[in-house]
Amino acid sequence: MAYLLGVGRVCVKTAGREAGRKCVIVKVIDKNYRLVTGPPELTGVRRRKCNIKHLEPLPYVLDIGEDASDEEVAKKLLEANILSEQDLVKKQVKP
């Protein structure tokens, strides 16, 4: 499964506080870990190291470079129209 988890792969986190949220792999750290980002303003997943056992790959791959910025990842995700309304973080407005 590790061969599926290259840079640009869109995944769903399966463990932790961000479980069920989509993220994008931005760097391969080693055979067991990947650096992922949501980015946080879109999906609520902050940039962090993640074990590949906690990632479920989706059939989408974004054309991004290694260590791409959150802004670049967000732009590519929105262009690809991969995220549904449920995937987006709702900003709460205080009255």
Image (cartoon, grey):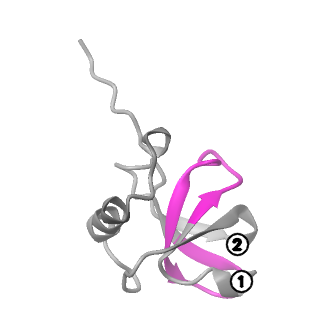
Which residue appears at 47% of the width and 78% of the height? 8
Q: Give the image location of residue 1, x and y in percent.
A: 75, 80
Q: How many marks?
A: 2
Of badges 1 and 2, nearer the viewer stands 1
Q: Is residue 44 above or below residue 4?
A: above
Find residue 35 and name its label. Answer: none
**Residue type at the position of mark 1:** Ala
Q: Are marks 1 and 2 in contact (CB under 8 Å)?
A: yes
Q: Nearer the viewer, residue 28 or 3?
A: 3
Location of mark 1 (residue): 2
Which residue appears at 59% of the width and 48% of the height? 18
Q: Give the image location of residue 4, x and y in percent.
A: 66, 82
Q: Residues within 10 Å of mark 2 (few under 14, many from 20)?
A: some
Residue farthest left in this picture: 95
Secondary structure state at the residue bearing disc 1: helix
**Residue type at the position of mark 2:** Ile
Q: Residues within 10 Å of mark 1 (few under 14, many from 20)?
A: some
Q: Earlier in the sequence, mark 1 or mark 2?
A: 1
Identify the image quadrant of the C terminus: top left
Secondary structure state at the residue bearing disc 2: helix
Q: Is residue 69 above or below residue 64?
A: above
42 is within the stretch colored magenta? no
Q: Is residue 7 above or below residue 87?
A: below
Location of mark 2 (residue): 52
Which residue appears at 40% of the width and 52% of the height? 40
Report the magenta residues as a range: 11-35
Q: Give the image location of residue 39, x and y in percent.
A: 39, 58
Residue farthest top in this picture: 95
